């Protein structure tokens, strides 16, 4: 990532994310995608909730940003969509925020299909508050609330969003940044016309990695590369279920 690009889009190059946090990879990919599409941040309104992921746009992006209440960024984004029809609306927030506490807003936003881009940072837990389990935590994972392993099954976010009525859902792991840049571009273009949802499969070495025997952030990325996570764009639930 060029220093110039970060200077152009970020208020400061120094973020507070932990060393090895997947969110830094996403930020670099997101800036690259915007640059390649020639998008002006000045005409984008970013919305986030509460959590580490919510800090990605706010305070770092040189743009209008709304840092809202936990679980509610999609409700705020819906309101902004209605009063600011000419602006691009981009929601960037965590899985705990958008799916667990805010799941009701997610299904209804997908059903409503209003034009906006949504990037859900899935690091499998509620990281900012100490690594509690949520609706995206894999079965068996050790968290601060499940020392013997999570007993519940996680949501498949693509399935959830498509079943709720959206027809643009995609998934990209941070271990594949080149593919992610292209995926972010597709989302940003689709988000001009409809509800475009992208799950970014991230890594949190601090709150998830350490408890689950990962020795380093690099080991988490290696596991992602080898795990064969289904990624790409999906518009049809039946087709997705065949994969
Ligand atoms: C209504 C409400 N409930 C709980 C909290 C505490 N809280 C703040 S951040 C957070 C976790 C956010 O997790 P996630 O959205 O997954 O983002 P991450 O930190 O993992 O990036 C929680 C539970 C809060 N601020 N407001
Ligand atoms: S706690 Fe996890 S998600 Fe939060 S900044 Fe650190 S590595 Fe990233």
Image (tube, rainbow, N blue to C red):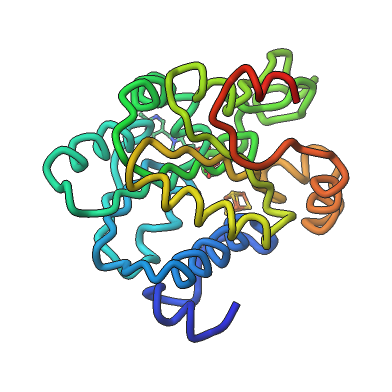
Residue drawn at x 64%, y 46% is: 172
- The correct choice, above or below, for 57 with respect to 211 in the image is below
Q: Position of residue 144 (x, y in %)?
A: 67, 30
Q: Nearer the viewer, residue 102 or 216?
A: 102
Image quadrant containing the C terminus: top right
Residue 236: quarter of image: top right
Foreground: 158 or 138?
A: 158
Foreground of the two, 83 or 113: 113
Task: List x then y, in percent, for residue 177.
Answer: 67, 60
Quadrant assignment for the N terminus: bottom right
Instruction: Out of 81 and 138, give the one closest to the viewer.
Output: 81
Picture layout, residue 100 above or below residue 58: above
Q: Residue at 65%, 23% (x, y): give it.
A: 239
Q: Is residue 145 left or right of residue 148?
A: left
Instruction: Using the rendered view, name the quadrant where residue 61 is placed.
Output: bottom left
Residue 234, image x and y in percent? 59, 33
From the viewer's perspective, tell me whether residue 164 is left or right of residue 123: left
Image point (61%, 34%), residue name: 125
Rendering coords of residue 233 (x, y %): 59, 39
In the image, farthest residue toward the left: 83
Q: Is residue 41 above or below residue 194?
A: below
Q: Residue at x 49, y 35 (%)?
A: 168
Count of marks overlaid on the render: 0
Left or right? Give the position of 88 relative to 103. left
């Amino acid at each position: 990532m060029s220093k110039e690009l970060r200077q152009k889009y970020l208020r400061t190059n120094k973020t507070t994310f932990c060393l090895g946090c997947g969110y830094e990879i996403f930020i670099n990919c997101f800036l690259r995608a915007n640059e390649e599409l020639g998008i002006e941040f000045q005409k984008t309104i970013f919305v986030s909730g509460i959590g580490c992921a919510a800090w990605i746009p706010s305070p770092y992006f040189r743009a209008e940003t709304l840092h809202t209440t936990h679980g509610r960024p999609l409700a705020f984004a819906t309101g902004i969509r209605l009063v600011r029809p000419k602006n691009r609306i981009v929601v960037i927030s965590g899985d705990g925020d958008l799916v667990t506490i805010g799941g009701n807003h997610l299904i209804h936003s997908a059903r409503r299909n209003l034009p906006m881009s949504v990037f859900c940072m899935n690091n499998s837990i509620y990281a900012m508050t100490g690594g509690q389990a949520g609706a995206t935590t894999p079965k068996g994972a050790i968290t601060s609330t499940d020392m013997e392993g999570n007993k519940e099954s996680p949501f498949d976010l693509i399935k959830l969003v498509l079943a709720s009525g959206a027809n643009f859902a995609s998934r990209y792991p941070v271990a594949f940044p080149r593919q992610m840049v292209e995926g972010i571009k597709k989302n940003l273009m689709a988000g001009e016309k409809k509800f475009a949802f992208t799950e970014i499969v991230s890594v949190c070495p601090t709150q998830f990695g350490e408890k689950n025997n990962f020795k380093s952030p690099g080991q988490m990325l290696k596991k992602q590369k080898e795990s064969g996570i289904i990624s790409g764009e999906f518009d049809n639930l039946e087709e997705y279920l065949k994969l």
